[in-house]
Image (spheres, rainbow, N blue to C red):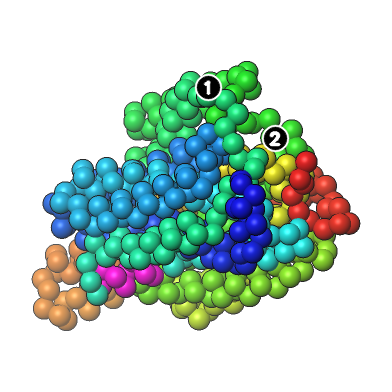
Amino acid sequence: MTTRSQRTLRSINPWMIALAVISATFMEVLDTTITNVALPQIAGNLSASTDEATWVLTSYLVSNAIILPMTGWMANYFGRKRVLLASIAGFTLSSLACGLAPNLPILILFRIIQGATGGGLQPFSQAILLEVFPPEKQGKAMATWLFAILIAPLLGPVMGGWIVDNYSWRWIFYVNIPIGLISFLMCHLFVFDPPYIRRTTDIVDYWGIGFLIVGIGSLQVILDKGQQEDWFSSSMIVRLGALAVVGLTLFVIREFITAQPVVDLRVFRDRNFTAGVWLVTVSSLILYGTTVIVPLFFQTMRGYPALQAGIATVPRGIGSMLAMIIVGVLIGKMDGRPLMCLGLVVAGWSTWDMGCANLSVGAGDLWWPQFWQGISMGLIFVPLTTLTYTTIAREKMGNATSLFNLMRNIGGSVGISIVTTMIARHTQIHTAILGSHVHPFSQTGMRFIAGAQDRFLLNDFDALTASKRAYSLIFAMIQQQAWMLSFIEVARLFGILFVVVIPLIFLMRKPSQKGDGVTTH
């Protein structure tokens, strides 16, 4: 950074910089879920099947995951501000192209570009915030940043449902354009490269990049398509699993033996960082997994449309907002580890409480459990994000934030995959068990079927049709009860897991008495 740039940076309010980078990050994270509710409309409009349309989601997530870990190297090699502006511009332009796409292959192509250009926005914004805010204010900065990336996935289905209901699916991409333009202008005016962001060599680790693309790309496709393809009963998933294992193994070996790695894995020698990455991976796995079951419950059990199911999750966002405001102030004044312990306990209790639901509950009955789960998000992630980087040198911050965000995203993807798979598998098991009790010697079952047949006969159905409808009705009830039992089991299991991971917190060193903050060595 030039002397003039340094003077300019010192004169800029750091919250203006925060607004610039967080708005771009919010836009990018929002796009991971905003398209979910629009898939049927996209498929119908572009003459594709719903299964084919799911590649609109998968293509974005795969390209995003591949770019994420490389952002630290890209910042040093090309210049962080240059890459940041290119990312925002690329994301904005590809959003426009997605909205104009005439067919599904073109849409998927630009979703790949959109995911790739958006991949650097999370780690870049986090690294910039840790630089421009002094240690005593980093908690507030991280709370604001975390609120954006935790709220965006919750708002995505709500916004997407509203846009699709009132306009066209194409507007879910067009809404990025004004945000992107404002963010690009603000970053151009307010963001500068610090002096330690510089190219140290012209050597490019092409082997490392290749292994990373194969390994991370295959893993992300597995996580996103595994349940749909019935996991390892699918030859595609088996082949991708082999590619993921081989690619990631060779990638790790390559990065440790090369002098100029594209991703510096030596950062894991730092105890706080390693413990923080483990914690964020496991916490994201559990938290994102529990986040996805509530909309599933309202859509599957209560018949809510996607928009109303998304609105029903608003209490979690309210709780997160309140907690992050409070914790952002406290984290600069106290050890964050007790806050994380409290957060995991609250998350465990609130998730277990969700497991006390039944078929008669509505959105109001799950208001408080969701609210307290939102509170737990602030208690867990604000101190965790701040403490993870306390002993990382500033020149290594870009590399560290890219790995941290990669593992948070992978943890979330694994959690969602586990929950959807467990719900599906346990529903099958409970359907078989409950169904086995409906037989000619079951007086209760036969009385219900007879009563249903009588009602259908009163509605002028013939005897055969009435009998078929009665059996269909009892089978639908069995499936509903089976899904409810699966929901309860998953909620209670994940509630227990929140408490089980508490010991991981004490792997992190106690922050120094001088306050949290990244080291400058």
Q: Is residue 377 left or right of residue 454?
A: right
Number of marks: 2
Marks 2/1 in contact by CB < 8 Å: the verdict is no
Work out which residue is located at the far front of the displayed protein and give it: 4
* Residue drawn at x 71%, y 68% as measured from the top left: 327
If the image is split into quadrants, where does the C terminus sit? Answer: top right
Q: Is residue 353 magenta?
A: no
Work out which residue is located at the far top of the displayed protein and give it: 257
User: Where is residue 106 shown, x and y percent of the image?
Assistant: 21, 45
Q: Quadrant of residue 257?
A: top right
Q: Which is the main secondary structure of the residues drawn in magenta?
A: helix
Residue identified by numbered label 2: 268
Q: Is residue 158 magenta?
A: yes
- Label 2 secondary element: helix
The amino acid type, in three-letter code, at marker 1 is: Ile
User: Where is residue 485 shown, x and y percent of the image?
Assistant: 49, 61
* Residue drawn at x 43%, y 58% as measured from the top left: 184
Is residue 202 visible from the viewing direction of this image?
yes
* Residue drawn at x 48%, y 71% as measured from the top left: 313
In the image, 76 versus 507, the foreground residue is: 76
User: Where is residue 352 shown, x and y percent of the image?
Assistant: 62, 64
* Residue drawn at x 18%, y 69% as measured from the top left: 466
- Label 1 secondary element: loop
In the image, 179 versus 423, the foreground residue is: 179
The answer for how far apart the CA atoms under marks 2 and 1 are is 23 Å
The amino acid type, in three-letter code, at marker 2 is: Phe
Residue identified by numbered label 1: 203
**Circle 1: is it few (<14), some (14-19), or many (20+) Cα within 10 Å?**
few
Write the start and end of the magenta stretch as one range. 157-165
